[in-house]
Image: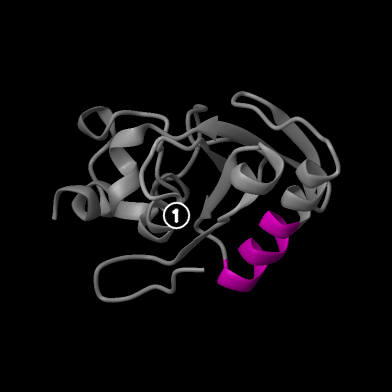
Amino acid sequence: MVPADDEGPGFAYTIGLWHTHGTPELAMFGLELQTMHVLLNSLGRKAAAGAVLESGMECHGVIEERSVILKAADLRWYREFFGLAISYYRRPPFPVLQVVWPDADGRFLWQPGTKEQYQQSQPQLWLKPAEHPAGVWTELATG
């Protein structure tokens, strides 16, 4: 868990799933840290038990009755967000899947009708930093 600070919002990610179970690391943004911790551990346990997690996959029942979607993080974001994992693995590449959660109406970041506040709550790490909409997440990557 990475707490919010003067530079930006908090987020959480796993370290060791790739090494121990051959499944991608997981990252989550925009919710309360303890909530993200619980959700990532839940998904990690499923992966450790043999569930296949891959980019584009929709996972049901992770947040109450709502689905989340897994998206592969672009390597260009790793240094800014996954420094401890880089230290653990000694260097990228190791796969990271962003766990993207929907807004209150069940819409995801890329779907029409989402509000600005929700769109800023999570980065879109599957995009190259240069293609990402401007906001707090791109400020972190270029700052």
* Residue shown at the point (44%, 69%) measured from the top left: 2
Which residue has dot 1 on it? Answer: 85
* Residue shown at the point (23%, 42%) measured from the top left: 134
Q: Is residue 22 left or right of residue 91?
A: right
Residue 116 position within the rendered picture, expressed as x and y whole percent measured from the top left: 39, 46
| Residue 37 lies in the magenta-colored region | yes
What colour scheme governs how the chains and residues are painted in the rendered image of this protein?
one colour
Q: Given the current orientation, which residue lies at the most extreme top position? A: 56
Residue 22 position within the rendered picture, expressed as x and y whole percent measured from the top left: 66, 37
Q: Given the current orientation, which residue lies at the most extreme front position? A: 90
| Prevailing secondary structure of the magenta residues | helix
* Residue shown at the point (54%, 31%) measured from the top left: 71
Residue 104 position within the rendered picture, expressed as x and y whole percent measured from the top left: 65, 49
Callout 1: 10 Å neighbours few (<14), some, many (20+)?
many
Q: Given the current orientation, which residue lies at the most extreme left position? A: 143
Q: Looking at this view, is 108 or 2 the one in front?
A: 2
Task: Report the span colored magenta.
Answer: 32-41
Residue 69 showing in the rendered view:
yes
Residue 142 position within the rendered picture, expressed as x and y whole percent measured from the top left: 15, 48
Q: Is residue 91 left or right of residue 102?
A: left
Amino acid at dot 1:
Ala
Residue 102 showing in the rendered view:
no
Res. 108 image quadrant: top right
Q: Is residue 93 left or right of residue 25?
A: left
Helix, strand, or loop for circle 1? helix
* Residue shown at the point (47%, 49%) measured from the top left: 118
